[in-house]
Image (cartoon, rainbow, N blue to C red):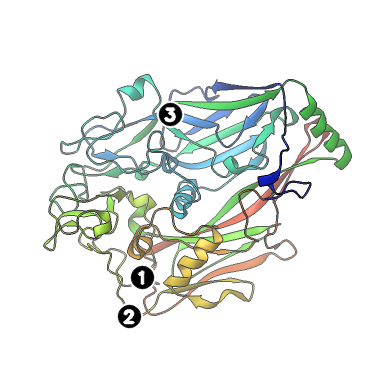
Amino acid sequence: MESASGIPSALSYSLNTLQGTSFNNFEVSPSTGAASVSAGGEIRFQLPNVGLLDFKTSKMTFSVTTTASKGARLPAHTDTLFSSMTVKAGGITLYAGNNFHHILENVKYNMGVKKACGVTGHKDCLDGGNQEGVSLHADDVSETYAGLGAANNVFSVDLGDMAKLSPRLLDLSILPALEITFRVNDDNCLSSIKNGIKGRGATNGATTDGSLAAKITIVNPKFYCNMYSLASGAYQQAIRARMDDVGYLSICYDNHLCFNSSFTGSSRFSLSAMSLKRLTAVFRRSSATTQGAFIPIVGGAMESVDGVVGAGYGILGSSRLAKSGVNEYQGAVQSMCLPTVAPAHNANEDTNAFGLYNATTPCNLAFKIQSAQIPQHFAGVDQQAELTKLAYNVEEFGKAKILPQYLANYYAFAIPLSLPESPLDKKTISGLSTQSTNAFLELTSNGANVQTNGSYEVLVFACVDTILRVGAGKAIEVLM
């Protein structure tokens, strides 16, 4: 990389200096005043009105309690506990997001563009013990946090799309008062299992339905603002000078619109956007909205499945060695798969030890924008995977280690509609414009192995660039 003078950075002695920088962390309590919020409830925070807020690292922390004796288990990733997140400034919506925030954030983890923290992010589904180190070995015992979780918060969640705001530090003094709202997901985001110490394939184990009807409560939510300030005032003068010269400042961030329906072989919707960056389709089984047992990750350790014991694949432990290997799960709400006839949508994931996908007929997909098909051919599973990695600018998926895991647990099909980006690139808006015509977009399929009877739900996420323009007197305008 070269400096502005054209000298490669490896040879440059230039040094940037910015004096008078200070940092502090502020705790904000919910403006709703509730110490606990149940499923479907909202948690609102009024943010400070001065200082530079770090949108990437400012997070909400909380604890969780669940109904006792229901075998309740939290899903992987704390984001899954919230169905939506919105941001307003002076009552004007800056970020509306969608009602499938929990699915979108899981897609990011699956793609590898977002990393989960095992300490405060509840990275995995926990079977035999919780984050407090409490044993969960008895039948129908629930994962809840009434010990350490009562004294301190144990989980955190970030601002989703807004965590990637450009610029990362935003001067709150130029905006009307900011309000952030999280909506708690419904109770079906939880799993209900019989006994976590009994592994996959065992009678009355982690993949057996528990007592069901478990309920979730978010306890003691707090928002922590990481704030910076510059003593000299030079930065504030510079941005106000730019505001005077141009008339406004431009702040850019992603916004995901979601279109969902029962999948019958195609899904059609319309969209008008300034810059459409990417389309992503994910599919969920009809059981995704029903509380039940864990969904096993393909290839993990088994207690006994059709005579198979141990890990199905050696990369997940000593292959076929009894009582050994890695055992991973996910909640039904976050399980995403290819919409196939074989295996069927209601196939027993517990006994499908190796994630069997050996149908000789295809399940191919493509998008259409107006009359143009992307890709020009119907994509098989190879191109579905490769195009999806291209769309998310990754070389490998974040979760799937083998093809059956991608198809059965972490599936997504995406196409890019903007130029690829590098981490150090200046923010560039290069997505497809559909503003002149209210474009019709369609996800379509081809092949005898495509399940078209409505057994799968399809969710298409349209990622669009959003620009917030801020003018003098805290005047704001949102362009999308």
Per the image, the residue denoted by label 3 is 62
Mark 2 element type: loop
Could one spot residue 188 in this view of the protein? yes
Q: Which mark is residue 360?
A: 2
- Pointers 3 and 1 in contact (C-beta within 8 Å): no
Q: Is residue 9 left or right of residue 235?
A: left
Please tell me which residue lies in front, 234 or 80. Answer: 234
Mark 3 element type: strand
Q: Which mark is residue 340?
A: 1
Residue at x 24% of width, y 60% of height: 313
Could one spot residue 47 in this view of the protein? no
- Decide which of tag 2 and tag 3 comes sooner along the chain: 3
Q: Residue furthest right?
A: 245
* Residue 373 lies in quadrant: bottom right
How far is mark 2 from mark 3, CA to CA? 48 Å
Residue at x 22% of width, y 58% of height: 350
- Decide which of tag 3 and tag 1 comes sooner along the chain: 3
Amino acid type, mark 2: Thr
Circle 3 residues within 10 Å: few <14, some 14–19, many ≥20:
many
* Residue 73 lies in quadrant: top left
Amino acid type, mark 1: Thr
* Residue 26 lies in quadrant: top right
- Decide which of tag 1 and tag 2 comes sooner along the chain: 1
How far is mark 3 from mark 1, CA to CA? 39 Å
| Image location (x, y in percent) of residue 38 | 40, 33
